[in-house]
DNA sequence: CTGGATCCTTTAAGATACTG
DNA sequence: CAGTATCTTAAAGGATCCAG
């Protein structure tokens, strides 16, 4: 039974997982496999360490990412997605596909206007 | 060919469509059919007219919603989704389903912890 | 390398009263 | 009814320097 509260919770949760400037980007990279902090910092172009750590902590608290430390010198940390989070991947892929397609559609329509 | 820029554009676009506190909620309601301003204000519980009009304008600028006015007295305005936006609906539904399910999974895990 | 701490700027959002 | 205008607060994000 999907009550209205379920929906509201889901909405809120969705925003926590996908909201903000960086989360989708970070998730998209982690779907390729585990990454160290520095690797993420490089691949999420433009993010500051402060924001990266904040987003990762948020996602960890939501059980979306795992954080694993290794006692090397210097210390290394690996971030990966939880198995539960993995199940989001196809949806996110489809969502991005839709966006790409939507943008293309709109551009095509603008071109048509020119020929009118 | 999906270049990196395509992906970045899609990410940005996705955030414009789904980001913020209210957009997903508004879209979810509009999937049920066209609504007048006041109807939306009632159904998007807690939103102020200022936020509602802002979000609607944003979505209109992105070609996600249509705005149609009628010269009745008093004036009535109907908002509806563009046909292109309609194609997002199944994805959004799945996304919310995923969220509901994820939340439930996490709750179940916490209950299991109690029995350990 | 992996962050923490601090300060600062920019957006997002809320409340409320008002107009054609 | 369908918005505007104004004011205020809260949250997000950026820059930079520092520590284990």
Image (spheres, coloured by chain):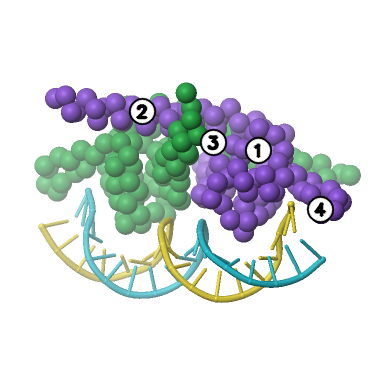
Chain colours: A purple, B green, C yellow, D cyan
Label 3 sits on residue: B96
Label 1 sits on residue: A30
Q: Position of residue A77 (x, y in %)?
A: 77, 48
Q: CA separation, marks 4 and 2?
A: 45 Å
Whichever of labels 4 and 2 marks the residue nearer the N terminus, that label is 4
Q: CA separation, marks 4 and 3?
A: 38 Å
Q: CA separation, marks 3 and 1?
A: 21 Å
Q: Position of residue B96 (x, y in %)?
A: 54, 36
Q: Chain of mark 1?
A: A
Q: CA separation, marks 2 and 3?
A: 26 Å
Q: Quadrant of the C terminus of chain A?
A: top left
Residue A16 as seen in the image, left or right of residue A75: left
Label 2 sits on residue: A104
Element type at mark 1? helix
Quadrant of the rendered structure where residue B16 is?
top left
Q: Chain of mark 4?
A: A
- Foreground residue among A38 and B28: A38
Q: Chain of mark 3?
A: B
Whichever of labels 2 and 1 marks the residue nearer the N terminus, that label is 1
Do discs 2 and 3 share a chain? no
Residue B43 as seen in the image, left or right of residue B68: right
Q: Position of residue D19 (x, y in %)?
A: 76, 70
Do discs 4 and 3 share a chain? no
Label 4 sits on residue: A75
Residue C12 as seen in the image, left or right of residue B35: right
Q: Residue at x 87, y 51 (%)?
A: A71
Whichever of labels 1 and 4 marks the residue nearer the N terminus, that label is 1
């Amino acid at each position: 039974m999907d009550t209205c509260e379920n929906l509201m919770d889901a909405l809120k949760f969705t925003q926590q997982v996908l909201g903000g400037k960086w989360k989708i980007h970070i998730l998209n990279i982690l779907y390729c496999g585990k990454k160290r902090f520095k690797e993420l910092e490089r691949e999420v172009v433009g993010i500051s360490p402060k924001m990266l750590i904040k987003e990762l902590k948020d996602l960890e608290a939501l059980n979306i990412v795992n954080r694993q430390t290794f006692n090397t010198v210097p210390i290394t940390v690996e971030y990966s997605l939880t198995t539960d989070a993995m199940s989001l991947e196809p949806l996110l892929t489809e969502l991005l596909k839709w966006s790409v397609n939507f943008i293309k559609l709109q551009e095509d329509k603008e071109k048509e206007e020119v020929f009118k």
